[in-house]
Amino acid sequence: MTDVPFPLLSAPGLKPQLAGGRIINCYPEKQPATAGKPYAYYRVPGLNGFGTVPNGRFRGGVLVNNIFYGVFGTSVYSWSSAGGAGTLLPGAIPGSDIVFGARNNAANPDVVFVSPGNGAFWINGAGQVVAYPDGNVGQPNAVVFHKGFFVFSYGNGTTRTSNVNVTIINMLNVATAESKPDTLYRPVPLGNGQLLLCGSSSLEVWGGQNDTGYPFSYIATIPRGIVGPAAAAGAEDGFGKGLFIVGDDNRVSSIDGYTCTPISNTDVDRLIEQETDKTKIRLGVFVSRGHGFVVVQGPAWCWIYDTTLQTWHERRSYLQQYWRGLYPVLAFGKWLCGDSDAANLCEISADVRKELGNPIMMRIETGPFGAFPNAVRINAIELYLTKGASDATGHDPDETNVEIAISISRNGGQDWSNPRNARIGRQSITNGRVRASIWGQAEVQGVRWRFEESEGVNFAFMGADMLGDQLR
């Protein structure tokens, strides 16, 4: 028997024969040294309905004490921890792209949203969405709360702050990020109390706290920019796994001190490079089962970086090449996100193994292996997995007697066979073998296997063994 080498990260390669394997809608979890296999592969967390609105797509939100405010289309809605139908606030925020939300530490917190290209907005004491109360704010393109101040940024490189825990704009509280003549997209707080001003060609670090004028002083420049307003994430409350960007070098990087460290593989880099409008690329973060996940999304693709194992997997929603989740944010102890396909506010949950009722198909594809330059006759494949994981109370027969779809490529991934189904066993029935025999002969390019499961049960892949004979 040959131990089938399961990949730890997705690496489809430029050509099928160059692939190192693929992991779609699942991720590896390192097992204890005494476990049967070193890794188990779990389904990605699903999406459960949390809140609804009549129409519009989620653009961003902010938690303020026990109320979550979310922008859908041009409208703002509020929710308590109970979720359900959102409460519409009077007023509107123009635009259709990302909005930035922030609140301060006033006794009655001020809630501010900025829609790039459309200005700043404020939720007043009557619960209405109105223009920012101080006209000196001008037309910012982003806002963040940092050390008592609302910090606004402007495309021309200017940054301006409010006074402490108020909306009043002091016109002396202004500075310019001018290391390079680039577009300033947004301010981002750093975990060390400093501030990162993110431009299209440079990142400027500001810190300290001045008694007069702009409250922070210039410290350093990082020679790297971001590709758009949504291309930075990690400073969100509840994440704490580091700061990440999609840089102007078409790579995903982590910010380590004053250094950008690339973390993306060539497949992710290629997708970023091929995007015509890179300002549409989005970064988001969430935490599930202790793993910090960094979501990198284009309009038609999604890859996720696991900060725990430092590996990548692909994420796809049902019948799509992309993930429906939008702009994750922590609220009420849950990670909430929008839905690119409908007017939903969703909860990201590992206890939910579907996306709003739709299946999440786990897929593992191995890289090519065999006996190059010899051909191989494949006699059988046997899977090592959590047998007996079907759900006796689930939908019959797909959930009560779950099947794994097994396909083979005998030419290194150029072509795939029709899948064969092997049952993992009814609930708690763990005897028997998950095995399929007589698969033919593989060419010198090597064997590749594909394993798929989509029934939504609490299930994990762990490995496989192949019985084969080396041929001349």
Image: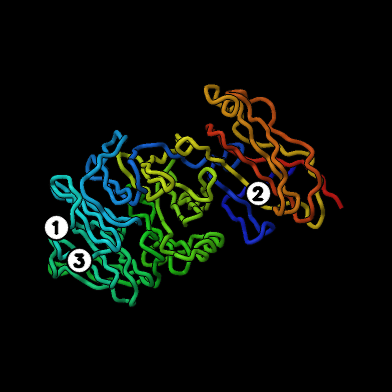
Seen at 29% across and 76% down, the residue is 178
According to the picture, the residue beneath numbered tag 1 turns out to be 133
Along the horizontal axis of the image, is 441 left or right of 196? right
Expressed as whole percent of the image width and height from the top left, the position of residue 7 reads 61, 49
Q: Pick whichever, 376 or 17, lies toward us.
A: 17
Gap in Å between the C-alphas at discs 3 and 1?
11 Å
Residue type at mark 3?
Gly
Q: Quadrant of residue 349?
A: top left
Element type at marker 3?
loop
- Mark 2 secondary-structure assignment: strand
Residue 226, position as x, y percentages in the image? 39, 66
Label 2 or label 3, whichever comes before in sequence order? 3
Of the image marks 1 and 2, the number of the one nearer the N terminus: 1
Q: Residue furthest front?
A: 54
Q: Is residue 273 left or right of residue 384?
A: left
Number of callouts: 3
Distance from the alpha carbon under mark 2 to that under mark 3: 54 Å
In the image, 57 versus 389, the foreground residue is 57
Q: Quadrant of the N terminus?
A: top right
| Residue at numbered disc 3 | 138
Q: In this figure, which residue is indicated by the disc labeled 2?
A: 366
Mark 1 packing: few (<14 Cα in 10 Å), some, or many (20+)?
A: some
| Amino acid type shown at disc 2 | Thr
